[in-house]
Image (cartoon, grey):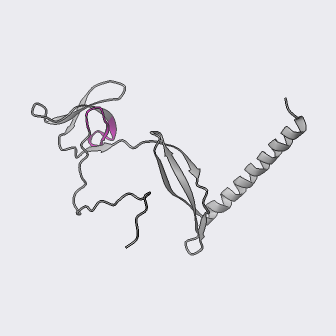
Amino acid sequence: MSEQTSKQRPVPRVELAARASFHPRLGDLALDLAKAGRIGVVVALPSDISASYQLRPPGGGEDWRARSDGRTLRPVPVSVTHVTPLKQAAAYDHRARQAAVPVTVHYEDGDTCETMLVLTSTQVELYYMQFDQLIEAEEAAREHELRSGPC
């Protein structure tokens, strides 16, 4: 058995069964599969007086209801803002003809996740040419700054 590092999250042991329902709280955003992926703010929870979730479009509008078991509801994924390379060596797998570049994914809510950017050999060649052009442009800009002097 492999050791678990602090960066790894424990894998929950779940029996093979139907997907667990999402049970949002009041004020949460939820995606409703029964409404073609429509996103709403939960404004009422299932209770003794209401047999369903009540959702409202984030900007206002007509409310709708979703099943009380939460089977059609899903959490709204947080958007990725950008990806940055980690200061670790990239690796190339000659059998798979793929490169793996360690990166950090940055999310809109400030969270981050370390993962690998996987590139085919064709993509590596394409980015090699593009990075070469970027390096040339940066060198030309630096030379221009040196010639023109301080402002």
- Residue 30 at x, y percent in the picture: 31, 38
Query: In which quadrant is the C terminus drawn?
Result: top right
Is 117 situated above or below 72?
below
Quadrant assignment, res 127: bottom right
User: Is residue 30 shown in magenta?
Assistant: yes
Is 98 situated above or below 21?
below
Give the residues drawn in magenta, as a range. 25-39
Is 133 situated above or below 91?
above
- Tell me if 50 is positioned left or right of 133 in this view: left
- Tell me if 69 is positioned left or right of 75 in this view: left
The residue shown at (53%, 51%) is 104
Is 56 situated above or below 121?
above
The residue shown at (27%, 62%) is 13
- Residue 77 at x, y percent in the picture: 39, 44
8, 82: nearer the viewer: 8
- Residue 22 at x, y percent in the picture: 26, 46
Residue lying at the far right of the rendered structure = 147
- Tell me if 85 is positioned left or right of 51 in this view: right
- Tell me if 58 is positioned left or right of 115 in this view: left
- Residue 93 at x, y percent in the picture: 58, 71
User: Is residue 29 shown in magenta?
Assistant: yes
The residue shown at (17%, 40%) is 68
87, 129: nearer the viewer: 87
Quadrant assignment, res 109: top left
Residue lying at the far bottom of the rendered structure = 95
Query: In which quadrant is the N terminus drawn?
Result: bottom left
